[in-house]
Image (spheres, rainbow, N blue to C red):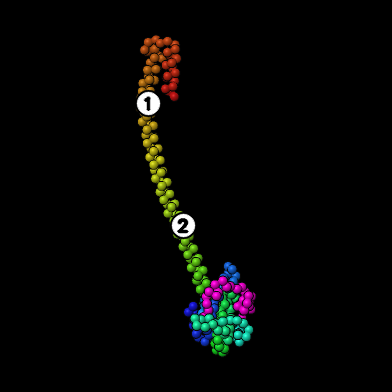
């Protein structure tokens, strides 16, 4: 806005519009105004080749119209009046042949060659400035996306670390449970083996007849006890 204001004041003009190129839609959209009612352009856009601004971009050269009241209905709008201009100039703003914007200047007076030369110089610098601004904007957007991805990655890493901690705790609990199980089995094995050994000893004594004679059925039963105890 400050740039357009300075251009208008320096060229004895009364109104101006800078339209920026929207690459996704491939259209120019008015963004910066001076001496124009913004609401008049709320739904306005144009493509390359459309109207005077579009033709200016298509040809890659400025368009200068004089005696505008005779050939069109351009108007300069402000709080106190609405008037037809004397001069209309449209510049395509390019960078390396790539369209970036258009600048339209409207004046109630004829603009001499000094003003035109001034505008020529400004527009050549404007292309560089807008291109740098777009690169800066894209760089910030990429940086923001990278930061967002980094934050998400950091969040996922923290969640993974928490899951790893939980897994380690579960593993320690499992190891502790296995340890208690092994101790329990060892203790139970010892507790069972002592009386079992006594039973096997008594079975051997009976089978050898050291405790007196027993029936064949009794011997068979004792033999089964002895065999089962050995397993």
Label 1's element? helix
Residues in magenta, as a range: 35-61
Crowdedness near tag 2: few (<14), some (14–19) or many (≥20) residues, C-alpha within 10 Å: few
Quadrant of the snapshot with the C terminus? top left
Which is nearer the eye, 203 or 83? 83
Magenta stretch: includes residue 78: no
Identity of the residue furthest to the front in this view? 80
Q: Position of residue 51 (x, y in %)?
A: 63, 77
Residue of label 1: 192
Q: Position of residue 159 (x, y in %)?
A: 43, 52
- Residue 193 appears in which quarter of the rendering? top left
Is 74 left, or right, of 1 in this rendering? Answer: right
Cα separation, mark 2 vs mark 1, equals 57 Å
- Residue drawn 56% across the image and 79% down it: 103
Which is nearer the eye, 12 or 167? 12
Q: Nearer the viewer, mark 2 or mark 1?
A: 2
Crowdedness near tag 1: few (<14), some (14–19) or many (≥20) residues, C-alpha within 10 Å: few
Q: Position of residue 148 (x, y in %)?
A: 47, 61
Residue of label 2: 153
- Residue drawn 49% across the image and 63% down it: 145
Q: Position of residue 25 (x, y in %)?
A: 59, 68
């Amino acid at each position: 806005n400050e740039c357009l204001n300075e251009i208008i004041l320096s060229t004895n003009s009364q109104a101006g519009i800078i339209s920026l190129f929207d690459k996704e839609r491939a259209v120019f959209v008015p963004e910066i105004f001076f001496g124009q009612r913004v609401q008049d352009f709320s739904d306005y856009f144009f493509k390359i080749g459309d109207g005077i601004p579009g033709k200016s971009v298509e040809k890659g050269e400025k368009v200068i119209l004089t005696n505008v009241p005779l050939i069109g209905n351009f108007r300069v709008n402000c709080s106190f009046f609405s008037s037809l201009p004397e001069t209309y100039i449209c510049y395509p703003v390019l960078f390396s042949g790539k369209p970036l914007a258009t600048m339209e200047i409207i004046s109630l007076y004829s603009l001499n060659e000094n003003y035109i030369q001034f505008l020529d110089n400004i527009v050549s610098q404007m292309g560089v400035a807008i291109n740098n601004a777009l690169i800066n904007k894209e760089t910030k957007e990429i940086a923001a996306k990278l930061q967002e991805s980094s934050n998400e990655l950091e969040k996922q890493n923290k969640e993974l670390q928490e899951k790893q901690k939980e897994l380690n705790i579960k593993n320690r609990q499992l190891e502790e449970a296995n340890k208690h199980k092994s101790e329990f089995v060892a203790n139970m094995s010892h507790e069972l083996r002592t009386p079992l050994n006594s039973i096997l000893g008594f079975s051997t004594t009976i089978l050898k007849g050291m405790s007196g004679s027993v029936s064949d059925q009794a011997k068979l039963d004792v033999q089964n006890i002895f065999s089962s105890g050995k397993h």
